[in-house]
Amino acid sequence: MSIGDISLTASMRSNLFSLQSTASLLGRTQERLSTGKRVNSALDDPTSFFTAKAHLNDAANLDSLKNGMSEAVQTVKAADTGVTTITGLISSAKALANTAKATAAAGAASGASDTIAVGTIAAGDTITIGATVLTARATLGTIVGDGTTEFVIGASAEGTAQIVSALVNNTAPALTYNSSVNGASITIARNDGGAMAAGDVTSSGGFVDTNNTISSGRMALAQQFNSIMTQISNVVADSGYNGVNLLMTSNTLTVDFGNSHTLAVGGFDGTGGLSATTANGLWAVVGNIDGDITKLDNATAALKVGSQNLSNNLSIVTARQDWTKNSINVLQTGADNLTLADMNEEGANMLMLQTRQSLGTTSLSLASQAAQSVLRLFG
């Protein structure tokens, strides 16, 4: 039935329109109260709706970066924990070295010979017999010079083991060399059959004097030192987090801050240069100990620089982390300001509209009384 099929009085039509408007406002107010938003779709306010949506998208993009920043903080903290542990181990190693310095060297060896154990030799390692220094050469070949100051590692080019003579107490000892390098030994003896004295023979690097110049106390301390050096390397290897280890120079941590802004945190040598360090010559002489103490001091200085870099980068990441959290809050607040409803206002609107609806219904009833009075004529 079309509207034109029924004739309403002007007052009734006016009251009906008012009731319809009130019902529409009631529906809108109920939606705002239920959702808490003044703008629920683009139809409510296109400008506010799309601007708020853009703010929320930006906030979501920033929020997706927070996890990466949080992981970066943990990676840096893991490295810093490793540095702290390694610094403590270095302090322990230095204490061992200072104790070794205060430990007396061994007395004269019994018997007429001294044994030099042969480890992994490098060119430049030495054996000192009296005042003569014998230096390992880098390559095989015929001994140059007079043969008293150099020797080759292993057999010569001619395939014979090298025998080098030197003076000890003005007596030429026999120095025999086992051509099997690793695990071999060199025996040094006085030709006159006299006993070797402490200090007659010293060595460096892969040559270790085992029975004449190293006391059992120093050797034990040197072995503890070597154990600590191994633990330092182990701590470095274990200081990674989520696949990134900043105590290794080959690792780099890239932190994404958004908008193509990143921070690259480079790794460094967490051993401080001690990765291949062992007690020099098992600390047979004080000079060997002093050299290792210098290495420890240099490592401590290097770790201090590395730790400072970690601290600086951690400050940057945490600052950007805080900035990201605050920016997300600003964007969400901006979106809310554009779309949220004033609940107090909407509650008051609801009460007023309900009152208006009740009054409209009453008014429509009064407007219909004229028609009802005609009906009474037929009563």
Image (cartoon, rainbow, N blue to C red):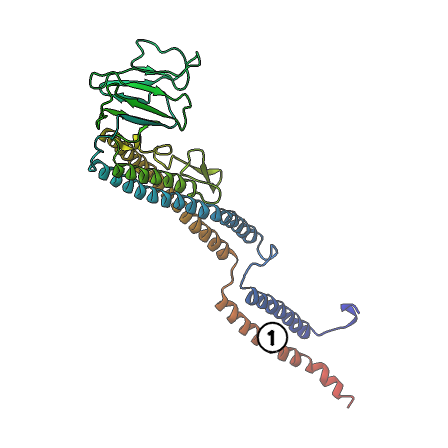
Q: In which quarter of the image is residue 200?
A: top left
The residue closer to the viewer here, 222 or 146, is 146
- Give the residue type that dot 1 points to: Gln
Q: Image quarter for residue 228? A: top left
Q: Is residue 265 above or below residue 5?
A: above
Q: In this view, does 192 lie above or below 66?
A: above
Q: Where is residue 249 in the image (x, y as percent from the top left)?
A: 42, 33
Depth check, front residue: 285 or 62: 285
SS label for mark 1: helix
Q: With respect to residue 259, does 166 lie above or below?
A: above
Q: In which quarter of the image is the C terminus?
A: bottom right
Q: In the displayed structure, does residue 338 sit left or right of residue 302? A: right
How many numbered circles are shown? 1
Mark 1 neighbour density, 10 Å: few (under 14) some (14–19) many (20 or more): some
Relative image position of residue 303 (x, y in whole percent): 32, 37
Q: Which residue lies furthest to the bottom in this view?
A: 379
Return the x and y of residue 241 as percentages of the image width and height: 45, 45
Q: Where is the N terminus found, in terms of image quarters?
A: bottom right
Outermost residue to the top: 145
Residue at 49% over, 40% down: 259
Residue carrying label 1: 357
> Which quadrant of the figure has residue 38?
bottom right
Residue placed at 44% from the left, 43% from the top? 240
Residue 199 position within the rendered picture, expressed as x and y whole percent measured from the top left: 22, 26
Q: Residue at x 65, y 73 (%)?
A: 15
Instruction: Choose between 54 and 42: the one closer to the eye.
Output: 54
